[in-house]
Amino acid sequence: MSEQRETATFAAGCFWGVEVDFRNTPGVTDVQVGYTGGHVDEPDYETVCSGTTGHAEAVEVTFDPAEVSYGELVEKFWSLHDPTQVNRQGWDVGTQYRSAIFTHSPEQLEIAAESKARAQARFGKPIATEITPASTFWPAEEYHQQYLVKNGRATCRI
């Protein structure tokens, strides 16, 4: 593995299952669950769930671009959830469960936008995913990190 690392940030509903899926992707070196995209500093789970912070449950993915490209991670993102749902995934409802790609560079913005346009052809409804510049990523509480692994579960999919 090379010494170079990059960061990608995605919101696709409940962060527990998304974390596992990205963590099991070759070339991904780390994944944290947390909160981003809102207006409150140092949010916690309870305040994010209140729907008043503007934050989404998200994953911050650290990856080796020599092993997996940002474009490949974005393509995986589309397969992990229903990006046509607005402010929800399954039973999880609220702005904190919105679909979003938070970009860290102009190159990521271009790749994400082009990928979204290609993905739209695969869905019968408009994609609701927002693509916005990344802001501060606030790691979730420790008990949320690798939650499914800690609790002996492989997935939380409905």
Image (cartoon, rainbow, N blue to C red):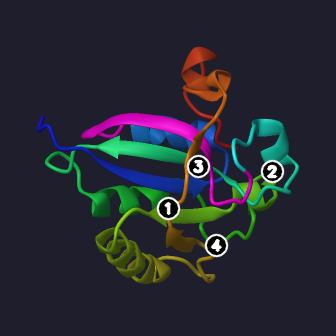
Task: From the top left corner, tell me how far across and down residue 102 is, in percent.
Answer: 50, 63
Q: Which residue is mark 1?
A: 134
Q: Is residue 153 above or below residue 131?
A: above
Q: Is residue 133 above or below residue 17?
A: below
Task: From the top left corner, tell me how far across and down residue 128 is, in percent.
Answer: 63, 76
Does label 2 or label 3 sit earlier along the sequence? Answer: 3
Give the quarter of the image for residue 93. bottom right
Give the CA distance from mark 3 to mark 4. 17 Å
- Viewer-side label of 3, 1: 1
Task: From the top left corner, tell me how far across and down residue 45 is, in percent.
Answer: 77, 38
Give the CA distance from mark 3 to mark 1. 11 Å
Give the CA distance from mark 1 to mark 2. 26 Å
Residue at image point 38% right, 34% down: 30
Which structural element holds mark 3?
strand
Q: Which residue is mark 2?
A: 91
Q: Which residue is mark 3?
A: 58
In magenta stretch: residue 27: yes
What range is drawn magenta here? 24-40
- Viewer-side label of 3, 4: 3
Does label 3 or label 4 sit earlier along the sequence? Answer: 3
Task: From the top left corner, tell me how far across and down residue 141 is, in percent.
Answer: 67, 28
Other residues around mark 4 within 10 Å, as few (<14) / some (14–19) / many (≥20): some
- Viewer-side label of 4, 1: 1
Does label 1 or label 2 sit earlier along the sequence? Answer: 2
Other residues around mark 1 within 10 Å, as few (<14) / some (14–19) / many (≥20): some
Look at label 2 and name its amino acid. Trp
Does label 3 or label 1 sit earlier along the sequence? Answer: 3
Q: Which mark is residue 84?
A: 4
Regarding residue 21, the answer to whether it shows in the image is: yes
Does label 4 or label 1 sit earlier along the sequence? Answer: 4
Look at label 3 and name its amino acid. Ala
- Viewer-side label of 2, 3: 3
